[in-house]
Amino acid sequence: MFSILALSVRLPCRSLKRTTEFYTKLLGFSVQTAWPEENPEYAGLRFGDVLVAFYEVSDLPAIRASFVLETDDAMEIYRRVQNEATVLWGPEVYFYGCREFCFEDPDGHQIIISEITNDPVTCEG
């Protein structure tokens, strides 16, 4: 039997500079890799064990990614992004014991923030 050791995603973006600033300044990621050095078209961003990479394209595909970032403080992230990004729903506490909300990054990729909680349910849907 084999093991899967990690998962990282690579997503297209219109402006690598804008996307990198969004993830580093707003969400606390750091740039691990930028290539080529002179005028990067690719960047790998890291937050602990989480790696998200972006590559610049002129025509962004119509299909956008959606992914979940599990955290220990969803409301702190919500406070950071609520005036800087489009919040699509939440924050709410769902019947499965998570406080969650969803927002879009500058290229329309949907990021769901999820935190396990014992707080009362605020949304049944």
Image: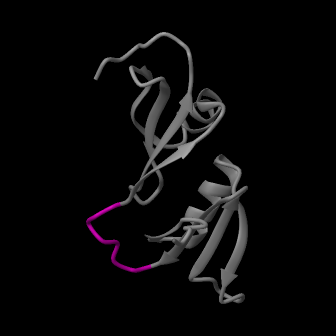
Left or right: residue 93 compared with residue 61:
right
The answer to which of 8 and 41 lies nearer the viewer is 8
Quarter location, residue 14? bottom left
Q: Which residues are magenta?
A: 57-64
Residue 46: image location, x then y, percent: 68, 62
The answer to which of 33 and 71 lies nearer the viewer is 71
Magenta highlight on residue 59:
yes
The answer to which of 15 and 23 lies nearer the viewer is 23
Residue 112: image location, x then y, percent: 46, 42
Residue 68: image location, x then y, percent: 48, 47
Above or below: residue 24 compared with residue 15: above
Quarter location, residue 47? bottom right
Above or below: residue 99 compared with residue 56: above
What's the residue at 56%, 31% (across, down)? 115
Magenta highlight on residue 84:
no
What's the residue at 62%, 38% (across, down)? 71
What's the residue at 66%, 33% (across, down)? 72
Please identify the quadrant where the C terminus is shown: top left
Residue 100: image location, x then y, percent: 47, 31
What's the residue at 61%, 30% (across, down)? 79
Left or right: residue 27 compared with residue 94:
right
